[in-house]
Image: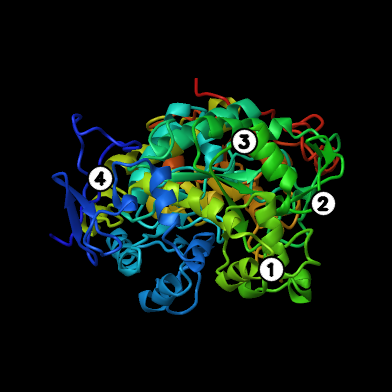
Amino acid sequence: MNPVTLLLSIAGSLLGAVPASEAVQQPEIGSRAKGVVVADGLRFHDLDGNGALTPYEDWRLPAERRAQDLIGRMTLEEKAGLLLHGTPPTGDGGLRSTWDIAKLAPVVEDRKIRFFIHRVSGDPSELARKANAAQELGERSRLGIPLVISSDPRNHVVSSFGLTVDAGRGALWPEPTGLAAIGDASLVKRFAETTAAEYRAMGIRMALSPMADLASEPRWPRVNGTFGDDPAKVAALVGAYVEGMQGGSGGVGTTSVATVVKHWVGYGAAEKGYDGHNPYGQRLIFPTGDLEPHVVPFRAAFRARAAGVMPTYGIFSPAVKIAGRPAEQVAGGFNKGLLTDLLRKENSFDGIVLTDWKITDDCPKECQEGTLDHEKVGMPWGVEHLSKPERFAKALDAGVDQFGGVMDLDILVGLVRDGRVPESRIDLSAQRLLALMFRLGIFENAYVDADRAAMLVGNPEVRALGADAQRRSLTLLKNGGNLLPLRDGQPKKVWLWKLSETAARAAGFEPVADPADADIAILRLATPYTQRSNFFFGSRHHEGSTAFVEGNADLAALQRAAAAGKPVITSVYLDRPAILGPVLRQSDALFGDYGIEDSALFDVISGKAKPEGKLPFELPSTERAVERQRPDLPSDSKKPQFRSGFGLRYR
């Protein structure tokens, strides 16, 4: 048959055996290294190469039955390899560099790993070809088990190393907080649908998203990845996201991108806002022990049948009780009460549990004191005293199915060989993972059409949707004298700060070098932050105070513009809730934005579009108020500058 396979397979998942009397829809069989078996006039992928139809090759059977059959044919090493979610080797060792397929081959063949995170952006057709080359390695293996390629979010204007991926040629949308500012669940579903189509085109079949965390601590670096801090509103948008990515609320099917909702649970209640990627950010603060508001958005994901859950890095404060007992003082991936009692028993979750990255790795003195070498970073919070094998065993006992960011096959196999973990426990997780893979349809066809990827990813229609969402998400906080929108015929000489002169000219403005020569000043500011230059993640995260104080370069630019005596229009990037103080006072018009292109701001300023955004969280008034608020409670600071839900409209 033609080795070039089609991108799209059947529209629905065949989850049960179909009687011969009923119509059967033949899925596309993508075969490059193995043949095809014909039975009952239908085509099947001869994955084991025996020339006959083996039960796990029969797409008419339920996913669970196929998984059970395949489990019985696999070695311990093959089963254990499924429990590892690795990183493809690259040519130069960089985490975002191009995959090296020759180096990937032994990882697939010898280490038996089948799940890989995708951190590369660029030419969609080239990414699709690389995915196909990787899938061919899986097809050539003894049992023809395909790969599942996952990705962190990658369709936003702003990207952050280790948390999101640059969009490349994909459509550009505001961050989840921007979608929350619009507050339209149908738009979030549409965003997820179009993003899923781009993912599938490049061979990505698992989304390490959405974040269902509440942005309850305003200093937290992950605020911009959330849908805000209101449990009910976040729940509605999380549910819409899962449905959009997976193609409905019926669970994963052959056209789905499987979602992994994160971070179960309470990750937003970070002590002083410090993130759990860092050794100084391990604690989650719940003074009264009430997890319920933070659980609410996850339940929406479960109702929508999210494929997986990722536990938090954090350790709960002692007041938290799970199943009537104080929470164990270990990170989420090692917490049996959190994963078995609260997740599976109380909330009836039956999908996969994938840990966040590197929780079984060591964090030695270098890691504790700060290192920029990612290979020396680990997050074994609460179990530092355990050996690596003991950490794996504890996580499995807690309820973990798969380990993110590690490829320690020998450790998993050794635990079984030494009698510390029964092989049946490996089988349990392998069964869940294989059932997911069968539902995705990748055993029939794991390949994608590279030429189609080039046409689909970032196509004009979807780019227009993203650009419109950027404009709509802008939140108007101040409009002194109804300055905005600017009227036709108004002078357009403009002094710019952190905006593109090209975009300004395209919008009809004439940039000038001195604010004194301008008719108006337009500035883009960033919410203030601090970084820890000696920590791998701390040097990239935005931490600390969000207050504009003397010495801040953006504030100095604003003061210069205001001193010129011309109208000042300011937009502040609210990746975290800013304490606006002097910015509010010295701006005639003020927006909050959530990661947008300059062109979107110019369109709204000039009246080509209207701002619709409502704050998805409150904006505190002082640093003291932030320090006194409770990390676990949404929007609870004293006398905030702007309350959650605030947003003006043009008259």
- Mark 1–mark 4 Cα distance, whole angstroms, equals 41 Å
Decide which of 26, 196 is in the foreground and name it: 26
Mark with earlier residue (1, 3): 3
- Mark 2–mark 4 Cα distance, whole angstroms, equals 46 Å
Q: Secondary structure at mark 1?
A: helix
Q: Position of residue 245 (x, y in %)?
A: 42, 40
Mark with earlier residue (1, 4): 4
The kind of residue tagged 4 is Ser
The kind of residue tagged 1 is Pro
Nearest to viewer (mark 4 / mark 3): 4
Instruction: Identify the residue under disc 1.
Output: 389
- Mark 2–mark 1 Cα distance, whole angstroms, equals 19 Å
Mark with earlier residue (2, 4): 4
Instruction: Identify the residue under disc 3.
Output: 228
Decide which of 65, 344 is in the foreground and name it: 65
Q: How many marks?
A: 4
Mark with earlier residue (2, 1): 2
Tags 3 and 2 touching, CB below 8 Å: no
- Mark 1–mark 3 Cα distance, whole angstroms, equals 38 Å
Residue 24 lies in quadrant: top left
Query: At 71% from the left edge and 71% from the top edge, which residue is drawn?
Result: 534
Can residue 605 be seen here? The reply is: no
User: What mark, if any, has residue 9 been given in the picture?
Assistant: 4
Nearest to viewer (mark 1 / mark 4): 1
Mark with earlier residue (4, 3): 4
Instruction: Identify the residue under disc 2.
Output: 329
Decide which of 142, 517 is in the foreground and name it: 142
Q: Local crowd at mark 2 within 10 Å, few (<14), some, or many (≥20)?
A: some
